[in-house]
Amino acid sequence: MKIEFRKVPFKAKEFLHENASVKFEGTFCRISPQLIDVKANLSGKTEVECGRCVKSFEINLDENLEFLLSDGVYTL
């Protein structure tokens, strides 16, 4: 999903993206003219390889994510 930074609404909007068995869903909204708040959850199962023995195994994902996105360099 692509949305221009200036078109992000001040009212929270939901999103959902699924790929295989992994789901990324949450909300995003503008909190100031230069900042966007994203709150999401990453869930599902994915297969990974061990870096030492190269055996594949499945891991469960259930992570809460929060991002503060800036349009350019943000200074306090």
Image (tube, grey):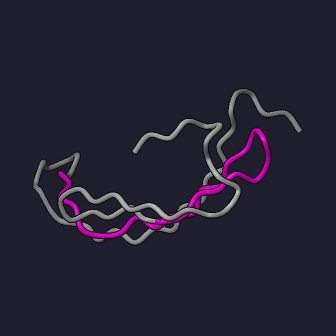
Quadrant the C terminus occupies: top right
Q: Residue furthest right?
A: 76
What residue range appears in magenta? 26-49
Residue 19 image point, x, y percent: 23, 56
Q: Is residue 70 left or right of residue 55?
A: right
User: Is 58 one of the magenta-colored residues?
Assistant: no
Residue depicted at x 61% and y 47%: 8
Residue 54 image point, x, y percent: 12, 48
Dividing the picture into quadrants, the one containing residue 21 is: bottom left
Residue 69 image point, x, y percent: 65, 43
Query: Relative to 63, is 73 above or below?
Result: above
Residue depicted at x 55% and y 36%: 4
Dividing the picture into quadrants, the one containing residue 59 is: bottom left
Residue depicted at x 62% and y 64%: 12
Residue 50 image point, x, y percent: 20, 52
Q: Is residue 3 left or right of residue 34?
A: left
Query: Relative to 38, is 14 above or below?
Result: below
User: Is 39 one of the magenta-colored residues?
Assistant: yes
Q: Residue furthest top?
A: 72
Residue depicted at x 39% and y 45%: 1
Q: Is residue 31 left or right of residue 3?
A: right
Q: Nearer the viewer, residue 4 or 56?
A: 4
Query: Relative to 17, is 62 above or below?
Result: below
Q: Nearer the viewer, residue 39 or 33?
A: 33
Q: Residue furthest left?
A: 55
